[in-house]
Structure formats: C-alpha cells, structure tokens
Image (spheres, grey):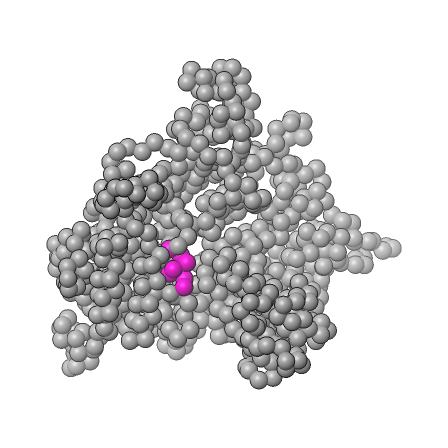
Amino acid sequence: MAVRATVSRFPGDQDALEESGLPWGVTVSPFASKDENGNPPVYGSDGHLLPRCENCWAYYNTYCEQEQWAWTCALCGTLNGLSSQAVTRYSLPESCPENLSSFIDLELPMDESEEMQARPVYVAAVDLASSEEFLELVKSALLAALEALGPGSLFGLATFSHKIGLYDVQGPIPVVKNVFIPHDADGALSMELQDVMPLLSFLAPVDTCKDRIASALETLRPTTSWERTSGAGQGLDGVFLGGRGFGAAMEALFNYLGSEYGNTFALARVFAFLSGAPDIGAGQLDTRRYGEQYASKGEDADRALLPEQTPFYKDLAAVAVQSGVCVDLFAVTNEYTDLASLKFLSIESGGSLFLYTSSDDSTLPQDMYRMLSRPYAFNCVLRLRTSSEFQPSHSYGHFFPDPQYENVQHIICCDSFATYTYDFEFANNVGFSRHTSELPMVQIAFQYTVVVPPDELANAGSSSTTRTKHSLKRRLRIRTLQFGVAHSINEIYDGVDSEVVLSLLVHKVILASLEQGVREGRMLLHDWLVILTAQYNDACKLIQSGHGGSSIVHIDVAFSQCPQLQPLPRLVFALLRNPLLRLHEEGVHPDYRIYLQCLFSGLEPSSLNRAVYPLLTSYASPDKQAYPRHSLSRAALITSGSPIFFLDAFTNLIVFYASTADPSLPFPPPQDCLLRTTINKLKQERCITPKLTFIKGGQDDATSFENYLIEEQDVEGSGFTSVMGFVSFLEEINQSTLEYMK
C-alpha cells in the first residue's frame, strides 16, 4: 500500500493552508505490494481480533499507547479497554504484527460457504455488428487472455448484435443459442438468459476446454445487414435501422451472472468488446449529437459532449456492482461512440476503459494478457480515517461509494496500480494545536479477497480434480501514518511532492470540465498557478516596495528559491496542452478526451507525471546514454549534439534518430543494447502496453515526435491563440500575478 501526500508536513490551520496556495491531500495505491519506500507489510493472522476504538472505529496500531488493560486511540485519543484475550495476545508484543509495524496485512476468517467455490469467472461479450478486422483482433486478444488465466477459472463466450448469442463449448462441437433483442429502448427480452442456457453450461473450465473455446472463437463472423433485417424484422424497405444491442446484452449478462452470485464463483469479470455506439434496444445512444447537426446549434462542444446523454449505463453499473461483476470495456473504433455515457460501466465497477482508434496497430492482445497476468484483489472495501482535527472532503478514483457510510468505497476489482485520491479539509477553526504533542494521523483500512492457486507441490500425488481447486483468502491490510506539522509557510513549501499535487489538480480539473466544460477546467488550472505564484512571492518577501507606496519590482514565476515547487509551472503548462484540456475546435475527439479522463484518474502519481510531461533522454549510441533529461524543445535537440533521442510519454515510446546521426549507427537499435533494455523494462512496469515507434529524422515523418516538443510551440504557430511557448506562458503568468496582487 503506497501512500503519498502533497506535503510531508501538514499546514497548521486553515489560514496556513490558504496562505500556501497548495492542495492538501494524499494518493493511495491500496493493493501495491510495498509502501512508497519499498517496504512490504508484516503478515499475520486473526485480523478479526484486532482491537478497534469504541469512538472512531480506528484499528489499534503502533502509535497507540498501551497499558496492561487498556489502550489509547492514536487518532481520536479515546481510552479503550482490552479484552482478556487481547491482554494475553499483547503480553508477548513481539509476536503480533500490529506491534511490529504500522503497515500490516492480516488474514480474516471465512465461513465454509465462501471457501467452497473459489472459481473466478471471465465472460467475453463480443460485438458482431462489426468488421472482420475487428473480430480478428478480438480473437487474438482472447487467445492471449486464455493463456493468462489461471487453472480453475471458468470462461464464457457471449456475442451481441441484434441478438444475444450464448456459447456452450463443453461438448465436442460448440453450440450457440440466441435470443433476439427488442428494437425499442424499453422492450424486454423474450426470455431470461438462464432459460436460454443454464449458467453452468455457459461457463466452461479453462483447463479442460481451452482448445474448444479457441475453436468457438474461430466461428465468430460479423452479422450481415441481411441477417439483421430479416432476423429481427427491422427492415424498412430493405433499409437497415441498426443492430448493436449492447445495453440490453450487458443488462441481461449481469442478471445472468448475478443470479448465482455467492455460491458458484468468487469473482466475475466481463470483457466487453465494442466497435461502435449501441444503436438498438435498451441503452441505445444517439451519436448525432457529435457532428454537423450538433455543431450548428451553437452549443459549447467542450461542454455538451462531456456529460452522459442517458443515466442508463450509470444505473447499470450499480447493478453490476450489486452482482459483484467488474466490467472492462475495450472500444476499437474511430467513430464517435459516446464513451461519456458508457464509461460508468467500467470506472464504477473497478474495471478499465481502453480505446483503440484502429485495429491495425492495436496493443489490445498485449493489454489483455498483461491485465490478467498481474495479481489483483476483488470484493474490496477501502476506508480512510483521520485524526479529529481534519477530514477527507473529496475522494476520487474508480470505485463505487458506499450508499450508507461516508468515506467508504467499494472496489469490485483492484490491481497493484489502481490509485485513489483524497483531499483534506480542517474539521474546525483550531487546526493542529501547537500546545500539544498530538500529530496528524491518517489510517487506511483495505479489506479484500484474493484467489490463492493450489499448491501443486503439496498435491503432487493427488488427482487432477483436487489440484485445480483454488482457495479464497480474505485479508485486512492497514496502514497508519503520522505526519509532521509545518510551523511556517517555508516548511510547507520545502515538503511539497509535485507529482501528488499534479494528481490532485488533474482530478479537480476533470471534475470542473465535466460539470462546467473544458474552458472552465483550463481557467481553474491557470488561476490556481497564478494564486500559488502570488502566495509564494508574498511568503518569500520577493515583492519590494518602492518610494511613495508599493511598486512591485520582481515576480519570481520560476520558484527559483524552492526546488520542490519548480516543476509545477512546467506541469501546468503541459497539462493545458494535453488533449485532456485542449479545446474541441483544436480537433480533440470527445471519446479520446473521455478515455484520457478515465486513464489519468486511475494512475499513480509518477505515471501520471510521465503522461502529462514526457521524459526526453539522449544517447550517444544505442549502448551509451548521453543526457538523462532534456526540456521538450527543438533547441534541446540541437544544442545537445546527441544523435539518438528517446521520448517516454507513458502511452507512447518514441526512438528518434537525428538527421545528422552517423549513418553507421544501427537503426532500429539492436535488441541487446542499453536503449532496448531500458525500453523493455519500461514496458514491463507499465499498467498498459505503450506503443513503440522508431523514426529516422530526414527520412520518416517526424510529426508524432515533434508534437511532443511543446515548450516552444509558438515558433510554428498553429493558428490557435492558446498555443504559446513556455517562455511566453511564464510571461503571461507573471502579468496575471501582478494583476491579481493589485
């Protein structure tokens, strides 16, 4: 569990917080195997015996004072009695994880019914109202997925178009049974999926049926317009009206899987592959809101295309969560699909949203394999508690908030990368009193389940049936942190973590864009930097007064006296130029913007930092690094004199050979060189597969590389007033800060 705060020493009170101009909060990656310093938790058992405070329900931890029969809660100061069982337990404190470390992971007991069936279930829902290319890509992705799934997993194959198809692959020949989707939005299916095919006929054991599943995948074909019009009776003089009943198919699948939830399987994941917008049945979407018809209405495109057009998918996400189903959505399309409406299915159920604009160079198979190969927890509950002087004011991330309890989030599926963000506010006017020794405390409790594969060695002599039985483990992971209090504004500034500040800013501007439009998000970000610059200059007393009243002599927009703040102007500059906040008229596709919102809102701070402000390094040869970091400008390319540049933009990796590079340098770089090793290591560590491109300057089109050189983009001048170089941007911030301070 990695936890990072915007500031290492918390502001003393509301005045200090406002004076600093900084956001105050933390990012939490609950299922990360180590903390932010690389330390693993101390493991133990009997999590249900851990004492809890009678007042605030916090868990006993190393910061609590313990007497023989009682303990004092480190978060709220309440004195709690200890049971005789706990007294015995704590008579040998060295034997208890909670006395050894403030980061612990304890087993919880499970009842027998929960342990009976620990079979994870995976269902692929494939769009047949699509093309051959789309289906070929999906087939290779699902074959990769089958390789990654552990023994004991169950797999179901479903298709959707104007009808839902369920495959039974457990016999010698795959059998598919169909049910038609009513064309109108409020029509119900003629029969429940359970009646079309019993769930246990649909879900096949991967270990014994892998080849049969692969054979069934080979039979997938796109539906023809003839099939759709004649089969569904929806032709109108031979004109086809639509045929992608995605919403109805998802609703039916969740009910199908949910009907058996709790006794047949431990976890259900649905992989939904979509090649365009749902256009028939429940949840159909009107894509005409994007395009000429819509633009002519004179509405603000940056505002109108961000909210969902129907609550259907948000409501459906609640059904998925209720049924314990996690949805991963893979959209492979360059048409407008209205991800603004569809995204709730994945982000609220703890799943992922992927967008691939073409099937030619798509990384879908690698992403599927990578996603299923890494460990993940499911059926998770996340709770953050603080000491009484402050409290969380907002939480951000891909979770489902508990309808009853504040600051409790449900996460159906959570991998080691998944990150959640909280911002804090003071609970009273006093803040952290200077007269006591009490320090601010944060405690994060994460309760989760994992499927533990059978220990094959232990059962080497037993039959294969027992060997594939997985077991479920329920665990409680707790992290308790104590923070210092800053006694001056300089102490706050000296402890800033710019990557975490960026995380909080990104969440806030996404929220502002969704509620009030992209322009509002841009203004919020710009104004925040202006206020921070003013507060910093005021605090560092860099403003001098002249004769006869005050005249501002110098504004330090580069934060030259505070290294921790120095990255922020560049990060804000880069974020304003990111497609996330670029305006609609600059050619940003609304679905791509939604995809970025979903991607950025789940990344841990270092990854987000890389996605917003790419890292440019140079190499003297494929085996020798020249400079570890350059600014993103052409000037950096020219002055460094290096022949090879490597740009890491998180989702894209680009190797660029300068046109002046020695022709004897091998292109592309050989597999066993330092540069390739670096690239392979980055690919391994990423939560998604970055796209790798090699460009030879002077021969290949270098636009994709040059687009990342944002720091001097006023040189070209793309005709948009919002595009200016970094130097002009700082001058503009300087001017706005002067105005603000007047």
Q: Is residue 245 left or right of residue 382?
A: left
For the C terminus, the quadrant is: bottom right
Q: Quadrant of residue 735?
A: bottom right
| Residue 492 at least partly seen | yes
Q: Residue at point 65% right, 48% down? A: 496
Residue at the location (83% across, 53% down)? 545
Q: In this view, does 419 lie above or below 581?
A: above
Residue 331 against residue 108 in the figure, above or below: below
Say which residue appears at 45% left-offset and 45% top-offset: 31
Q: Position of residue 225 (x, y in %)?
A: 20, 77
The answer to whether residue 240 is above or below residue 321 is: below
Q: Quadrant of residue 195?
A: bottom left
User: Which of 352 and 728 lies nearest the eye of the viewer?
Assistant: 352
On the image, the x and y values in percent for residue 83 come to 42, 17
Residue 124 sits inside the magenta stretch:
no
Task: Check the image and name the residue furthest to the front.
Answer: 461
Asked if the stretch drawn in magenta spans residue 367, the answer is yes
Residue at 19% in and 56% down: 202
Q: Is residue 160 visible?
A: no
The magenta region covers 366-372
Q: Quadrant of residue 118?
A: top left
- Name the magenta segment's main secondary structure: helix
